[in-house]
Amino acid sequence: MANTLKEDFTRRAGAPPRPTAAGPPGPPGPAALAAKVRTMAPSMTRSMQRVAETVAHDPAGCARLTVTGLAERTGTSEATVVRTSRLLGYPGYRDLRLALAGLAAQQESGAAPSVTADIALDDPISEVVAKLAHDERQTLADTATALDTAQVEASVTALAGARRVDLYGVGASSLVAQDLAQKLLRIGLIAHAHADPHLAVTNAVQLRAGDVALAITHSGRTVDVIEPLRVAFGHGATTIAVTGRPDGEIAQYADHVLTTSTARESELRPAAMSSRTSQLLVVDCLFIGVAQRTYETAAPALSASYEALAHRHSPRPR
């Protein structure tokens, strides 16, 4: 449906359809299943959440169940089980069962990490450090496992050849957009991060084919980020979305979608905060990829920027 909307929008804008460099990703493998559940569960209905959390917590037991058996165990319906399977990225329940069997085998071999408890108000700081460190590692591992490298490759190609790069994000995502903009500027690319939504839209109007617009939003439905990306898409720019919700509205206006994971949301640490870890991993991957592609110009630019700032990091001789 998203692809159809993109094609219709492009035709209305009077621009020819743009080919995409990467095809649709296949179903997630066993290692990515648990990460997919953690990412998608918050946006599911309660009945679908029960199915998703059950298969993630007991993959061995659920792998032995028929679709009817899993529906009975979770107190849902067969239709809910099938819909949950598809939302997690599997064509049907049979494909999900195969992934569950693989995940169970990984857990039996000790490959799957344990899950820590949420941070409590009376936790000592040593426990807070340990729990946060675990969640950060888990978030990074989940993102790396679930990330579609073909989409990353296509995004790097677009960025490396871009005449201009505009980046959109608000709140914590704005900090990530600024981080990538600064990195790209240091290797000689023209990049601007727009935290002001009005300024983002007015700049998006100026984008054309050969430009890149990259939007960062964990929820996938942040209006102030969606709007400039929609405008950029309509003017022919290559559009990239970095989001924890690949089924969100933002994907309708993205040529390439890079999916992030997040640590488990809690009262003290909402998803919007914990998502920044995975977003930073993705933008670092993009930056390194672009630097590799443009090394002949990137390396001298990095050296020049370092030399220009060197005197600010050490006292000048008197």
Image: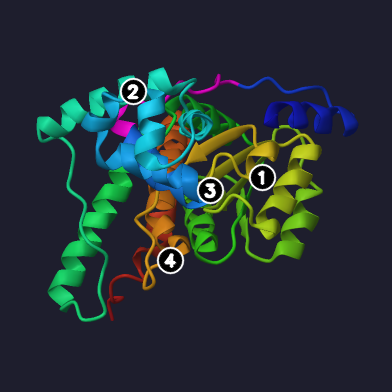
Query: How busy is the neighbourhood of tag 2: few (under 14 within 10 Å), some, or many (20 plus)?
Result: many
Q: Which residues are magenta?
A: 21-32
CB under 8 Å between callouts 4 and 1? no
Instruction: Name which residue type carries label 3.
Output: Thr
Instruction: Look at mark 2 in the image and give the residue it sits on.
Output: 97
> Residue 198's image quarter?
bottom right
Q: Position of residue 141 (x, y in %)?
A: 28, 42
Query: How busy is the neighbourhood of tag 3: few (under 14 within 10 Å), some, or many (20 plus)?
Result: few
Instruction: Look at mark 4 in the image and give the residue it sits on.
Output: 270
| Image depth: mark 1 or mark 2 in front | 2
**Residue at figure coordinates x 47%, y 52% from the top left:** 42
Pick whichever, 138 or 82, lies toward us: 82
User: Which of marks 4 and 3 precedes in the sequence?
Assistant: 3
| Image depth: mark 3 or mark 4 in front | 3
User: Which of marks 3 and 2 precedes in the sequence?
Assistant: 3
Name the element at disc 1.
Answer: helix
